[in-house]
Image (cartoon, rainbow, N blue to C red):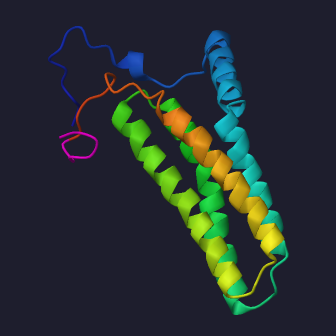
Amino acid sequence: MAWENDDEDFDPSDFEAGEPDEEALADIRREDERIQKMPLMILAHQIFDITEALLETLPDDDMSEHYKSIMLEDALTLAPKIAGAEGADLYTLRMENAVIIKVAARNLLTQTAGLKMMGLSDDRYLNVLRDELDLFRLHFIDWIKTFDKSKDIQDNWGLFYD
């Protein structure tokens, strides 16, 4: 069954996938470069590297494997969610990504307390990650202040609006 078009101004070819032109590709590259150079993104990558290095110092046991899994997931969440928020122009979508970033960063911090309590890691290593997370938090606060609440549509979920 063919779809019938009642809108004479609608042209389905406007939506057909094709090769992006050079100007569009250049815009995509510039935007990616801008995002990758953001201080928050740089810190997200550093947090991943520090987390990965810290986890390599843990003993090979079941408890450590549990921490490794959780912490890698949280560390891997930061950068993609920053990119997602930067790619979204709607306030609500940016804030949703920001909340996920905050939860992941706080989870990492919580896991450092667990590693300390269980005696699985040296405090010096844990403090390096904690210091980087605190710096990340400060940049995060500045970053979310740049979100423009006027660029949004309400999503009827009740978050971020009364």
Residue 112 part of the magenta segment: no
Quadrant (top left/top right/bottom left/bottom right) for the N terminus:
top left
- Left or right, 64 with respect to 92, comes to right
Query: Which image quadrant for residue 10?
Result: top left
The structure residue drawn at horizontal position 54% and vertical position 34%, both measured from the top left corner, is: 143
Q: Position of residue 50 (x, y in %)?
A: 79, 59
> Magenta part mainly helix, strand or loop?
loop
Query: Which image quadrant for residue 106?
Result: bottom right
- Furthest residue to the bottom? 61
Q: Which of 58 and 135 is in front in this view?
A: 135
58 lies above or below 6: below
- Left or right, 91 with respect to 86, comes to left
Q: Position of residue 159 (x, y in %)?
A: 26, 46
The structure residue drawn at horizontal position 69% and vertical position 61%, both measured from the top left corner, is: 130
Q: Where is residue 22 in the image (x, y as percent from the top left)?
A: 68, 12
Q: Which of 127 and 36 is in front in this view?
A: 127
Magenta residues span: 156-162
133 lies above or below 62: above
Residue 65 appears in the picture as rendered: no
68 lies above or below 60: above
